[in-house]
Amino acid sequence: MPSYRLLKRFKGLHLDSINAIAFSPDSSMMASADDQAKIVMTLTVNGRNVNTFSIAGASVTVLHWYSNDSALLFAGLRSGKLYACIVSPGAYAPREPTWICDLAGPIRVCLVDSTSKRMIIGHGISPVDNVLKPLNFEDPALVPTGVHISPSAPNQLLISYLDHRILDQSCYDLDEDITIWRVWSDRRIGASALSIKGDAFVATNLYDGIDFYSTVKHNRINRAALHIFENVLIPIEFIHEDESVLVRSSTGIAVILSTELGRQQQVLVHGSSHDLIQAVGYTVYRGWKYIATGDSEKGDNTQLQVWVSVDSKQ
């Protein structure tokens, strides 16, 4: 497992809570967005600012690149609006973001699948009729915390939900609009991620740590106790070709865990123990591994940090 060192610390790039970080499909650029609806594009290798977008109206809560296009970035807002941003590095006057649609806010998660030509959006706080939802649905409101499509099964959608513990992960057939299988959970799920291979699923539970699931056997295979967050929706993602997972925290750190055993591999200290690290990104560019972390501080205290693997090209 590679170790990481701090490459660059940005102060003043954002002046409000950083809600989302996303590296471009070709890994050459990083997009970050905040509570002032500001989206900043920087180069991965040196942090040079190449584009900045501002969207009036509400905080940006989600960033998602079109799967194979490093010039098209989607931005979801707390208000429920969805925009498309055309990224032109070095352009003197970048294009204004293009409005796509209005949904019941906030937009929580977004997925764009180029194979099936589908965009999946998890949004809102109230149940509506035309959504995929568990059977025997009851209050509280249905809140999706993750949407995933495996490359090996482009017609299957895996969804995690916040409060519905009896049916926290559901796999739907998008062609037939039916539930294929379910994984039962005894914890509320704050966020989830699907492995590159599609055979593993990981979720932050809002009680005592990280849960690892098998999408092949449809059961939980491990639980890693990790008291690094309070009752908040802290995202998580697979890194290192599925050998590790990266999780944010409400204690000023980001933690890398082994996927197989759930053991802690490295701690990235972003800020003080009171800082909420609520955005993170990972990519591999020209043989180097990069991790970005963003916090929820305000004004000059808002920091975006980029970490690079110490070992050379892997």
Image (cartoon, grey):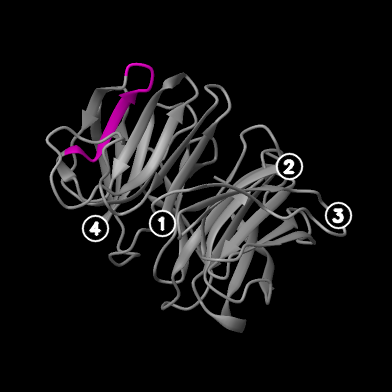
Image quarter in which the N terminus is found: top right
Circle 1 residue: 106
Q: Is residue 295 above or below residue 311?
A: below
From mark 2 to mark 3, how far is it between C-alphas? 12 Å
Earlier along the polypeptide chain: callout 1 or callout 2?
2
Tag shown at residue 208: 4
From mark 1 to mark 3, how far is it between C-alphas? 31 Å
Amino acid type, mark 1? Pro
Earlier along the polypeptide chain: callout 4 or callout 2?
2
Amino acid type, mark 4? Asp
Instruction: Residue 166: say if magenta.
Output: no
Circle 3 residue: 91
From mark 4 to mark 2, how far is it between C-alphas? 39 Å
Q: Which residues are magenta?
A: 167-176
Asked where in the image residue 192 lies, by quadrant, the reply is top left
Instruction: Return the residue nearer the eye: 80 or 113.
Output: 80
Q: Is residue 111 above or below residue 225?
A: above
Q: Give the structural element (helix, strand or loop) at label 4.
A: loop
The residue mark sitting in front, 4 or 1, is: 1
From mark 1 to mark 2, how far is it between C-alphas? 25 Å
Residue 255 at x, y percent in the picture: 45, 58
Amino acid type, mark 2? Ala
Residue 257 at x, y percent in the picture: 42, 49
Amino acid type, mark 3? Ala
Circle 2 residue: 71
Q: Can you see residue 104?
A: yes
Is 144 on the left or on the right of 304, as rendered? left
